[in-house]
């Protein structure tokens, strides 16, 4: 049993050392012009979501989702954000292909967000 545990610990240590070696010797590609894999995107989003969940202040939204607030927010988004991120009508931004990295498309998410807000008010 002792040999099994020692073998497990040795394997973990060697794996960590190998990952460190690969990282510090420049064998991991970090170029910004390479499209990340689906696994990388999924992992990055999970890490970001967990970090925000852990570190974001715990508070209620100070803005009530009234009709006037939603209209004002949509107007601000359309004036200042839609050109890069898209909107419910033009989901594909005319500038998205010219920017690097491309801005996230919020048009589809915006529809879902507004729909949820409207459903909560009912």
Image (tube, rainbow, N blue to C red):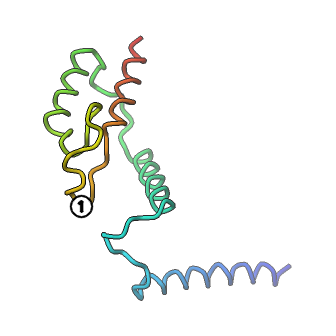
Q: Residue at x 40, y 47 (%)?
A: 52
Q: Position of residue 119 (x, y in %)?
A: 42, 17
Q: Position of residue 10 (x, y in %)?
A: 68, 84
In this view, the residue in front, 77 or 46, is 77
Using the image, determine if residue 30 lies above or below residue 101: below
Q: Residue at x 19, y 40 (%)?
A: 81
Residue lying at the far right in this picture: please name it: 1
| Quadrant where the C terminus is found in the figure | top left
Q: Residue at x 48, y 87 (%)?
A: 21
Q: Residue at x 81, y 84 (%)?
A: 3
Element type at marker 1?
A: loop
Q: Examine the image and state in which quarter residue 85 appears.
A: top left
The residue that disc 1 covers is: 100
Horizontal placement of 103 versus 55: left or right?
Answer: left
Q: Position of residue 118 (x, y in %)?
A: 37, 18
| Quadrant where the N terminus is found in the figure | bottom right
């Amino acid at each position: 049993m002792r040999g099994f545990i020692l073998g497990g610990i040795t394997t973990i240590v060697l794996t960590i050392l190998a990952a460190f070696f690969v990282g510090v010797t420049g064998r991991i590609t970090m170029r910004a012009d390479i499209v990340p894999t689906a696994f990388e995107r999924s992992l990055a989003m999970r890490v970001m979501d967990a970090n925000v969940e852990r570190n974001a202040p715990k508070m209620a939204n100070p803005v009530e989702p009234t009709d006037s607030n939603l209209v004002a927010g949509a107007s601000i988004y359309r004036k200042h954000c839609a050109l890069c991120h898209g909107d419910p009508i033009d989901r594909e931004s005319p500038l998205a292909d010219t920017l690097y990295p491309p801005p996230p498309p919020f048009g589809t998410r915006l529809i879902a967000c507004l729909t949820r807000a409207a459903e909560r008010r009912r």
